[in-house]
Image (cartoon, grey):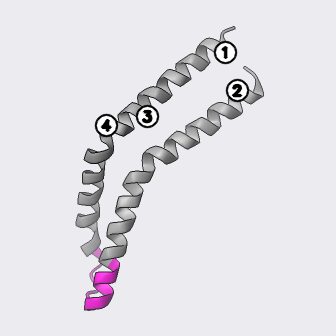
Amino acid sequence: MTPELVVQLARRSFEATLLLAAPLLIASLIIGLLISVFQAVTSINEATLAFAPKIIAVMVAMIIFFPWMMSYMSDFTREIYSFIAIMRR
């Protein structure tokens, strides 16, 4: 196993992690910002108000993006298995 291969595997792993987490985090961020603006406008200072909408938004984003996420994860897994074949040489 060469150092270049290790660096490439680490880079691809970080890239995959960021790409798979991004849709869920963005949905949570947008809902959190909307709830914060709503709380600021109405002067409601309830800390637990944002939890339920964020959970619902993340679940909806998970349902919407799940096919793409599974496809990306299976492609990445195939790529890792191909690297294992390269390492054995």
Residue stretch in magenta: 36-48
Residue beneath disc 4: 67
- Give the amino acid type for the residue marked by disc 4 in the picture: Pro
Residue pictured at 67% horizontal, 15% vertical: 87
How far is mark 3 from mark 1, CA to CA? 23 Å
Of marks 3 and 2, the one in the foreground = 3
- Please name the predominant secondary structure of the magenta segment in the image: helix
Q: Earlier in the sequence, mark 4 or mark 3?
A: 4
* Residue 26 position by quadrant: bottom left
Name the residue type under label 3: Tyr
Residue type beneath disc 2 = Leu
Q: Residue beneath label 1, please?
A: 87
First reached walking from the N terminus: tag 1 or tag 2: 2
User: Which residue, given by chain and number where applicable, does mark 3 sit on?
Assistant: 72
Q: Is residue 68 above or below residue 22?
A: above
User: How far apart in space, not on screen, are marks 4 and 2 (Cα)?
Assistant: 29 Å
